Image (cartoon, helix red, strand yellow):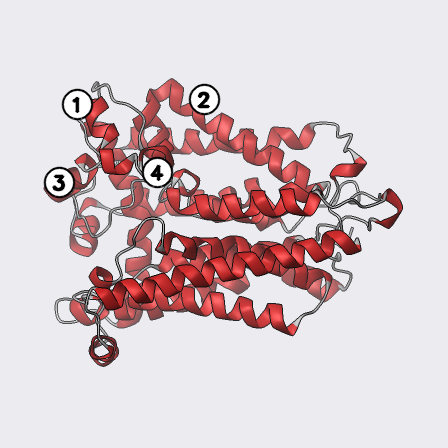
Amino acid sequence: MSRTRKGSSGPWWLSPAGTVGLIVPFTLALAAFNSDGHFRASWRTGKFLTSADIALFAAAAAVFVVGLVWPMLLRRNPRPDAQWPGSAEERHVRLTKAAGVLFWATMFGYISFLVVGAARGVRPADLITFITKQDAYDSPLRTYFAPVAGLTTFTQVGIAYVIVAALLLKQQRSAKVLRRVVLVVFLGLLRALFLSERLALIELAVPVVAVVFAVGTPVRRRSRQVLLQLGPVLFLPLVIGAFGVFEYFRSWVFYSALKQQSFLEFMLDRLAGYYATAYNNGALALQAAHGIPRLPYQSVEVLWTAPGVGALDLYGRLSYHISPTSYDTLLMQHANPEFNSPGGLAIPFLDYGTVGGFVFLLLVGSLIGLVYRELRDGTSWATLLYPLLVTGLFELPRYLYWAQGRITPALLGLVLTHWWMKSAKVPPSAAAPAPELQDAHGR
């Protein structure tokens, strides 16, 4: 079986180190250079971030990047049977069937959302009121459609579906698959709009972008190579515009009566605030927890919030004086709960101390770097997994996305998909070459 061309790489901004290098320095600078007065006037919180905190977070990012990069220096000897199956008929059929299962599992989750909302008393008039008032700040919809573990959780399988579907579409066009992708993304859009859950759309869009631009036939045309290199610049207006639409419904109607700003000024300041306050909240949490022993929580949140475990309040019982709500209480007393991101670079130090935090970042970075190295070689499991990890790289300044329970259904779906696909018996001669990672120079 053929392997991915040696030395090929996806666009720089979708590589692990490229993504972190793109997002962390800029967002950390936003937090560092805005004054305490600006923090208070714009985001209603004091500035707790010190020069020592800034240096710590910068060093944390550097250590994380070291972990991301060193696997690329390894000499690879990929096993032929581990390669992406390409268009091998039996495996392609199985991948298509797996996509169907993932799609209907996602639909089950959204149907459960509707049933739960109806059981709690939501009415069509509530949706009409939301649309006419254009104000999600005081909307009761989030209460009506609050998640129910084990039911609405299935909506998160949609992440796995769009990854598998995008890979199928890269191999062969299918109107049916495309319609289903559009439907899943549209439902995520509704969650983002009506329930102020922007992440529901982000975690669908980012993996699709990763598949579209990182996996497939290398770009040959010079003009397209340049456009691929300039991806972040070209996507920036789209990202800002989408953020503006959601923020208009989420908070503009409320704050427009309080602030003497244009909507554009408000939107840009709000966008900066989500990142700046994340670093600031992380610094506040580190200062508040200094010298207080605690069990790791946010870095392994998926374990503490797992079905059955979360209901037992196991973390609160084992940690005695600290509970999962301690962070929320800290924000209510000293900061602004509206900006509640804990800061992804602060969490490891909060859970493991200074030395342990650096070790954690190095290990996590190394794991992601190894996955990306396998992706470059066209390994099938990494081709499925890496698009899921990219979302966490972009969200690193705000929180550790990979540690949250919301990715568990998608991860499980991808693992089962890979197992089902690889269990097909395909003669070596029937397997097609691995899909090459795109590179901005067509190499």
| Residue that label 4 marks | 306
Mark 3, Cα crowd under 10 Å, few <14 / some 14-19 / many 20+, is: few
Q: Nearer the viewer, mark 2 or mark 1?
A: 1
Tag 2 or tag 4, which sits nearer the N-term? 4
Q: Is the C-beta separation of discs 3 and 2 under 8 Å?
A: no
Could you say whether the residue bearing mark 4 is in a helix, strand or loop? loop
Q: Could you tell me the amino acid type at mark 2?
A: Val
Quick check: 288 left or right of 194?
left
Give residue 320's mark.
1
Kindly identify the residue that appears in the image at 34 percent across and 48 percent down.
30
> Could you tell me how many numbered marks the image carries?
4
| Residue that label 2 marks | 359
Which residue is more in the foreground, 275 or 118? 118
Quick check: 121 left or right of 79?
left
Which residue is more in the foreground, 214 or 172? 172
Q: Is the C-beta separation of discs 4 and 3 under 8 Å?
A: no
Mark pair 3, 2: CA separation: 30 Å
Q: Could you tell me the amino acid type at mark 4?
A: Ala
Task: Give the vertical position of 9 relative to 257 (above or below).
Answer: above
Kindly identify the residue that appears in the image at 75 percent across and 50 percent down.
436
Q: Nearer the viewer, mark 4 or mark 2?
A: 4
Kindly identify the residue that appears in the image at 69 percent across and 61 percent down.
170
Quick check: 226 left or right of 48?
right
Mark pair 1, 4: CA separation: 20 Å
Q: Is the C-beta separation of discs 4 and 2 under 8 Å?
A: no
**Could you tell me residue 77's position as x and y percent?**
78, 30
